[in-house]
């Protein structure tokens, strides 16, 4: 969601999705996450955490993150349930990259519409998310510079150039809707 926030502020059309079957966020212990179904709003998640342990979730920064999220969009969405078609998909974790690629492969490419899937391997904590969001913004700005008509011809060159200057490991794949 940090990348969603940063890209939106810079005028990019952005959607963000989860890829798991449920939403898991940190709980009182590593083996006790808070779990929610997709469709639950960020407001409901926020109120649930306040009800459970406001001190813990204020201390660990989770209330601040959920508050930011509820100002960005109503509720988490699941990629596998989306019917939207994108030119570029950016994931922030290897597992999400794999799940997005598997979902697109499962759909079978019936529309013949190319999609570029790019993964930044970003550690899931506020500091790395902020740094990673800035890197994603820089890449998106570079992709925007070449324009939609030239994207297919130049994306690999841009990714390779970007990777040579980035601290974030990246993966790239071309798939089809």
Image: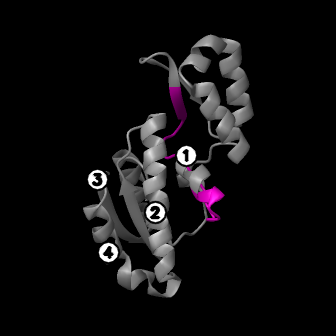
- The residue at 57%/48% (across/down) is 78
Calculate the distance from the C-alpha at mark 4 to the C-alpha at mark 2.
15 Å
SS class, disc 2: helix
- The residue at 48%/51% (across/down) is 133
SS class, disc 1: helix
Query: At which x and y percent is residue 18?
Result: 53, 46
Calculate the distance from the C-alpha at mark 3 to the C-alpha at mark 4.
15 Å
Calculate the distance from the C-alpha at mark 1 to the C-alpha at mark 4.
25 Å
Marks 3,1: beta carbons within 8 A: no
Q: Which tag, 3 or 1, sits closer to the chain's start?
A: 1
Q: Residues within 10 Å of mark 3 (few under 14, many from 20)?
A: few
Magenta highlight: main SS: loop
- The residue at 51%/40% (across/down) is 21
Q: Nearer the viewer, mark 4 or mark 2?
A: 2
Side (left or right) of 86 relative to 9: left
Residue 127: quarter of image: top left
């Amino acid at each position: 969601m940090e990348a969603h926030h940063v890209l939106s502020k810079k005028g990019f059309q952005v959607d963000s999705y989860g890829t798991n079957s449920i939403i898991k966020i940190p709980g009182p212990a590593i083996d006790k996450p808070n779990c929610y179904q997709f469709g639950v709003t960020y407001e409901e998640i926020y109120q649930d955490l306040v009800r459970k342990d406001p001190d813990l979730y204020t201390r660990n920064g989770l209330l601040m993150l959920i508050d930011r999220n509820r100002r960005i969009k109503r509720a988490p969405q699941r990629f596998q349930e989306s019917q939207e078609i994108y030119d570029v998909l950016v994931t922030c974790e290897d597992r999400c990259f794999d799940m997005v690629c598997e979902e697109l492969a499962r759909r079978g490419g019936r529309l013949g519409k190319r999609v570029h899937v790019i993964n930044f391997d970003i550690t899931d904590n506020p500091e790395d998310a902020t740094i990673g969001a800035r890197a994603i913004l820089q890449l998106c700005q570079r992709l925007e510079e070449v324009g939609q008509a030239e994207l297919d011809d130049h994306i690999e060159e841009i990714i390779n150039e970007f990777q040579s200057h980035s601290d974030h490991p990246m993966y790239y794949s071309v798939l089809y809707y």
